[in-house]
Image: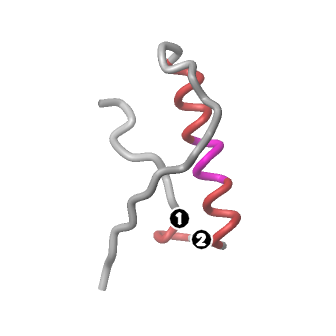
Amino acid sequence: MSFCVEGLIRNNFYDMGNIEAVEAELNRASHLLNDYFHLEGEDKYKPEYFKC
């Protein structure tokens, strides 16, 4: 069984023109979500399709 969850996370990030800053912010948010929901292994949240 699998499922997909989408959501909006409020933040104060506005530096969309800086791709390195965007990647760092996405990684920071993913670590927060993984820690908060105790996600591990294949259930761990990670930004996908970032290079698009």
Residue wearing tag 1: 44
Q: Are marks 1 and 2 in contact (CB under 8 Å)?
A: yes
Three-letter code for the amino acid on which mark 2 is drawn:
Leu
Q: Is residue 35 left or right of residue 47?
A: right
Query: Residue shown at 39%/36% (left/top)?
Result: 50
Residue 30 in the magenta stretch? The answer is yes
In terms of sequence position, does the residue under pointer 1 or pointer 2 come before the other? Answer: 2
Q: Is residue 8 above or below residue 34?
A: above
Residue annotated with mark 2: 39
Q: Is residue 36 left or right of residue 52?
A: right
Helix, strand or loop at label 2? It is loop
The crowd level at tag 2 (other Cα within 10 Å; few <14, some 14-19, many 20+) is few
**Is 38 displayed left or right of 9 in the figure?**
right
Q: Secondary structure at mark 1?
A: loop
Quarter assignment of residue 25: top right
Instruction: Report the residue at 61% width, 59% height from top.
Output: 33
Q: Position of residue 27 (x, y in %)?
A: 59, 42
- The residue at the far top in this view is 17
Alpha-carbon span between mark 1 and mark 2: 5 Å
Say what amino acid the circle numbered 1 marks.
Lys
The stretch in magenta equals 27-31
Q: Is the C terminus in the top left, top right, bottom left or bottom right quadrant?
A: top left
Q: Nearer the viewer, residue 26 or 13?
A: 13
